Image (cartoon, rainbow, N blue to C red):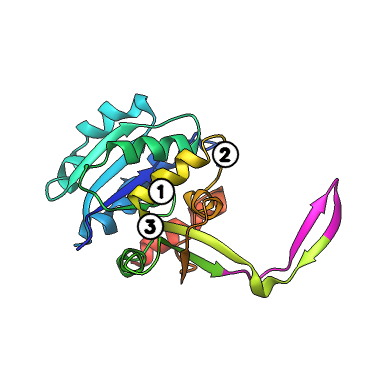
């Protein structure tokens, strides 16, 4: 059986949202606590690495909610980097040396189902990695200098989500081979290195909170659960 380390990068500045939303209270609890919950419940996850701005580490460790959720699983809280890929790499290097798989999940996606985490992990039995994604429902335009250059067939376009789970040694290899490439998800590094990545049908409710409207939708969803 694989040993799996989950990495939750939460070191972003929240520039599009206007504040560091991952620490904002959603119905009385920090957003990150919702995000960590299904990973803590999962029997497949052996440890969680929570990557945050260094200034938040002591505060998080002192919170009662953190003390409560960390009773049954090892949760490491570490400092992130300037960019996402630096934060995730910090997380990988902080994982237990016996870990086989790395499962990366956005801190701003608080509603992932535990079953989807399981699917990405199990798919690594046959593939180098697996990610969640959903088919695009919109027509996709390539734009250059403010004008449409071409249109892409939306039937072949998928919008990636997290979690994204990969073999640890192969992900580290992808980082090494593409150290000068700035990416917005780890799957891109794996693709550039030629690894086989399985697509798993995601969930529209596994949305990423990026703006104020997303936040209002999240509040409604929490009220309904």
User: With respect to residue 23, does 144 lie above or below?
Assistant: below
Over which residues does the magenta segment extend?
A: 135-149
Q: Residue placed at 42% from the left, 36% from the top?
A: 87
Q: Are marks 2 and 3 in contact (CB under 8 Å)?
A: no
The image quadrant of residue 67 is top left
Above/below status of 69 relative to 195 = above
Residue at image mark 2: 182
**First along the sequence among labels 1 and 2:** 1
Q: Residues within 10 Å of mark 1 (few under 14, many from 20)?
A: many
- In the image, is residue 94 part of the stretch drawn in magenta? no
| Position of residue 143 measured from the top left corner of the image (x, y, whole percent) | 80, 53
Label 1 vs label 3, nearer the camera: 1
**Residue at left offset 57%, top offset 39%:** 182
Quadrant assignment for the C terminus:
bottom left
Q: Is residue 74 above or below residue 15?
A: below
Mark 2 closeness class: few <14, some 14–19, many ≥20 residues within 10 Å: few
> Residue reaching furthest left?
71
Q: Nearer the viewer, residue 108 or 146?
A: 146
Q: Which residue is mark 1?
A: 171
x 49%, y 52%: residue: 190
State the residue position of label 3: 165
- Tell me if 125 is positioned left or right of 143 in this view: left
Rounded to the nearest whole Å, what is the CA distance between mark 1 and mark 2? 15 Å
Q: CA distance from mark 1 to mark 3?
A: 9 Å
Label 2 to label 3: alpha-carbon separation = 19 Å
Q: Residue furthest toward the top?
A: 55
Between disc 2 and disc 3, whose residue precedes?
3
- Residue at the far bottom in the pictured view: 155
Q: Secondary structure at mark 2?
A: loop
- Magenta stretch mostly in which secondary structure? strand
């Amino acid at each position: 059986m694989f040993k799996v380390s989950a990495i939750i990068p939460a070191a972003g500045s929240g520039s599009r949202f206007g504040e560091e939303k991952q620490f904002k209270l959603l119905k009385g609890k920090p957003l990150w606590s919702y995000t960590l919950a299904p990973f803590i419940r999962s029997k497949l996850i052996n440890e969680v690495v929570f990557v945050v701005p260094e200034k938040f580490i002591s505060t998080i460790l002192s919170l009662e909610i953190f003390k409560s959720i960390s009773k049954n699983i090892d949760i490491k809280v570490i400092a992130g980097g300037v960019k996402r890929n630096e934060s995730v790499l910090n997380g990988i290097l902080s994982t237990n040396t016996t870990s086989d798989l790395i499962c990366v999940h956005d801190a701003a996606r608080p509603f992932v189902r535990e079953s989807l985490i399981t699917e990405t992990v199990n798919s690594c039995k046959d593939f180098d990695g697996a990610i969640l994604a959903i088919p695009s429902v919109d027509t996709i335009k390539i734009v250059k200098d403010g004008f449409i250059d071409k249109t892409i067939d939306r039937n072949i376009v998928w919008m990636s989500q997290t979690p994204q789970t990969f073999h640890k040694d192969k992900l580290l290899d992808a980082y090494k081979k593409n150290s000068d490439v700035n990416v917005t998800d780890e799957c891109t590094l794996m693709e550039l290195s030629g690894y086989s990545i399985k697509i798993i049908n995601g969930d529209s409710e596994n949305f990423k909170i990026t703006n104020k409207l997303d936040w209002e939708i999240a509040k409604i969803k929490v009220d309904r659960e």
